[in-house]
Image: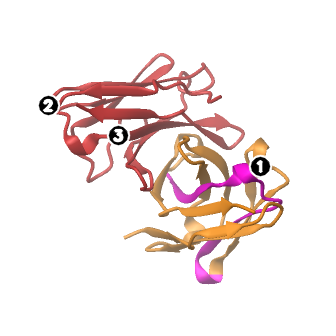
């Protein structure tokens, strides 16, 4: 059981916005530790989408944004496109030089 | 451009060992930690541990201590991850990824290798 909890699935229609949550204990997410987000298409390697809760690497569309409130980090995808359909994982430092991933969220574009 | 290229798929019998390689290019491998993450079929990502290619120091998730070994050969810019005493539930895609950032507790993973499928089958 992951220490970071994500919804198993979310869905939205093209053009809409969806938000994926990642809820941790006060040890993860709630403290100063960072959260990163990864997109994974079927049969492909994960791809970094957001780091430091809200920073977007170059090349990632600005439709992707991240935020944090209390013990919950969130990934918001606005202007949903068909190619956004994928699995999304959050990740956080877990102390003692270990890391932990959320269970993953399957995004379906209707 | 930074790339991590992994070795090809493997099929192993239960009880055997498998060693997966991860070759770095576009940067000096000793400059960044390399992490290993696995994904069982239809499941999520599971963090396994990391190696410091500069010192050879390692840290493993508790679950993998004692049967996973991470090593490196800096002369060929390659990191390795070996799983011993393979079981059927070790069947998974194994990924390497570079740790990026300035403070370890704030860092992230980018890029990732393409993944190596290890199948444990009799």
Judging by colour alone, the chain drawn in red in this rendered image is A
Q: Identify which residue is drawn at 76% across, 65% down.
A: B13
Q: Position of residue B94 (x, y in %)?
A: 59, 58
Judging by the rendered image, the residue that carries numbered circle 2 is A15
Q: Is residue B23 above or below residue A86?
A: below
Q: Position of residue B105 (x, y in %)?
A: 58, 40
- First reached walking from the N terminus: tag 3 or tag 2: 2
Q: Is residue A27 above or below residue B102?
A: above
Q: Which residues are magenta?
A: B75-100
Whether residue B27 sits left or right of residue A100 in the image: it is left
Judging by the rendered image, the residue that carries numbered circle 3 is A55
Q: Identify which residue is drawn at 74% across, 57% down.
A: B58
Whether residue B52 sits left or right of residue A72 in the image: it is right
Mark 2 Cα shell of 10 Å, populated few (<14), some (14-19), many (≥20): few
Judging by colour alone, the chain drawn in orange in this rendered image is B
Q: Choose between B17 and B81: the one closer to the eye.
A: B17
Label 1 chain ID? B
Q: Mark 3 or mark 1, which is nearer to you?
A: 1
Instruction: State whether residue B122 appears in this view.
Output: yes
Judging by the rendered image, the residue that carries numbered circle 1 is B64
Mark 2 and mark 1: span between their CA atoms?
43 Å
Mark 1 Cα shell of 10 Å, populated few (<14), some (14-19), many (≥20): some
Q: Identify which residue is drawn at 45% across, 24% down.
A: A7
């Amino acid at each position: 059981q992951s220490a970071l909890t994500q919804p198993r699935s979310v869905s939205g229609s093209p053009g809409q916005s969806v938000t994926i949550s990642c809820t941790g204990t006060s040890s993860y997410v709630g403290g100063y530790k960072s959260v990163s987000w990864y997109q994974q298409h079927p049969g492909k390697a994960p791809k970094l989408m957001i780091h430091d809760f809200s920073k977007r690497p170059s090349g990632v569309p600005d439709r992707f944004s991240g935020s944090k409130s209390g013990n919950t980090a969130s990934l918001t995808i606005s202007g949903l496109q068909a190619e956004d359909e994928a699995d999304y994982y959050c990740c956080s430092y877990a102390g003692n030089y270990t890391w932990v991933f959320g269970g993953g969220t399957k995004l379906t574009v209707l | 451009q930074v790339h991590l290229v992994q070795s090809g798929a493997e099929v192993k019998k239960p009880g055997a060992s498998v060693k997966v390689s991860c070759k770095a290019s576009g940067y000096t491998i000793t400059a960044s930690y390399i992490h290993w993450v696995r994904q069982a079929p239809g499941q999520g990502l599971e963090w396994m541990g990391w190696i410091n290619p500069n010192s050879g120091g390692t840290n493993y998730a508790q679950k993998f201590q004692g049967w996973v070994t991470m090593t490196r050969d800096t002369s060929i810019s390659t990191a390795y991850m070996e799983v011993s005493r393979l079981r059927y539930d070790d069947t998974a895609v194994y990924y390497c990824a570079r740790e990026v950032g300035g403070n370890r507790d704030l860092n992230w993973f980018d890029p990732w290798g393409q993944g190596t499928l290890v199948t444990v089958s009799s």
